[in-house]
Image: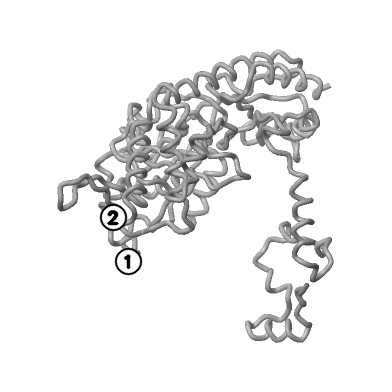
Amino acid sequence: MPTYTPHTPDEIESMLEFIGLGSLGELFDVVPEALRLPHDLAMAPGIPEPDAVAHLRALASRNLECGPELVCFAGGGAYDREVPPVTTALASRSEFVTSYTPYQPEVAQGVLQALFEFQTMVARLAGLEISNASLYDGASALVEAVNLGVSASGRSEVWVSRGVHPSWREVLKTFARGTGHVIVEVDLDQGQTRWPDTGRPGVVVMAYPNHLGCLEDVGVARELADSTGAILVMAFDPIATSVLRSPGSWGADVAVGEGQALGMPLSFGGPYLGLFACRQEHVRRLPGRLVGESVDTDGRTAYVTTLRAREQDIRRQKATSNVCTNQTLMAVTAAIQLGWLGTSGIAEVAKRSALGASYCRDLLVGIDGVEPLTSAPTLMEFSLRLPIDASTLIDRLVDEGFLAGIPLDTEYTGTEYTGSDMRGLLVTVTEKRTRSEIDAFAAAFARALR
């Protein structure tokens, strides 16, 4: 069997000289030191492909999956929710599965209709007039919402609640370095945002529920936006909003969310789905693709991408957004899941999750040394203060067959702890968790703290 032959030192030197580098190390200077492997791979050079695949499979087998091996109580933006066989079967049909996201307005009518239905359902969940055909994920949707808000308000200062997912805020700050947006993070107090009394932001961003699982008074943020002329952006949970007031009913100008909970498995972090909806007045600033309903020359219903700003593809220096594509297959999957659940079904998912979370929270805070981290009301997620480091607890509970939650750093728990000691834990309960699983989790939780 042929094997891979490594380049000789002379060949490597010649290639480095060609690209103007003095050593192989210089080629990787852009990679942070902490991310570099300090030693060679534990594999013989040039091994046959079957041997390499077998080695990789052995490494992959060390991962523990939610469901077969671990009962999942972790969330924070990615949720272990039920994906019915009908969603998987329909979304995997060859009519939908493609390696390429089509850009042309004359793309297959079936795909366009599915995207149109997706937009309609997202707009209804958000309580707003317009939804696009999706973005890459929740974080990219937030970036695009802030871009829209800055363009609409004409002011680049953006107030962002620390209740917004920390990873989303990091992505936003990364983009802001290029756009010049001024990001001002606003602290939480007992799980609720304490907006400043002075200042004139162009965009106000909050989450409902927020990263700690808390429900905030969105009316305060709306009053702030009204008094300053700012655009209000709300990050929402598509499952939670089935039983809560929608962003639009709260007065949000733009609503963004992560759509993973709508039929997508955890999948080690993706591909996921960005939700984006806004008021009709902002439709010309809408990022990405928008599918509209029309009629063809014979009077039959037809679907077509519409209101696409030409600048997004060609005259990019004048574009409000350069996002030209979307997560088509994930959006179709979400449309199938939402169509299967219906209005009452998605509300039932939220109610079952909320009841389970309330029951689980009562059990856990009854354990010696465990306290609620916040006093604000919660729905499907809640935060705890622990007597030991959260990562230590999580490691112990893995041995018991549970994925206990997500550690919360000192941004949320305060500065009384030092180093890597994180005493906050975010716990999530979805509709998949049974009473017996919750009881077993609470018992294992108590044992792990001893």
Apparent side of residue 59 relative to residue 327 in the rendered image (left or right): right
Q: CA distance from mark 1 to mark 2?
A: 11 Å
- Placement of the C terminus among the 4 image quadrants: top right
Q: Nearer the viewer, residue 343 or 296?
A: 296
Apparent side of residue 236 relative to residue 128 in the rendered image (left or right): right
Among the 4 quarters of the image, the one containing residue 22 = bottom right
Q: Amino acid at mark 2?
A: Arg
Among the 4 quarters of the image, the one containing residue 224 = top left
| Image position of 443 with respect to 110: above or below | above
Q: Nearer the viewer, residue 312 or 181?
A: 312
Place of residue 362 in the rendered image (x, y in percent of width and height, measured from the top left): 64, 14
Place of residue 279 in the rendered image (x, y in percent of width and height, measured from the top left): 29, 38
| Image position of 258 with respect to 348: above or below | below
Q: Which mark is residue 308?
A: 2
Find numbered disc 1 in the image and state the secondary structure of the residue it sits on.
loop
Q: Which mark is residue 314?
A: 1
**Is there CB contact under 8 Å for labels 1 and 2?**
no
Dot placed on the residue nearer the N-terminal end, 1 or 2: 2
Place of residue 166 in the rendered image (x, y in percent of width and height, measured from the top left): 57, 41
Q: Residues within 10 Å of mark 1 (few under 14, many from 20)?
A: few
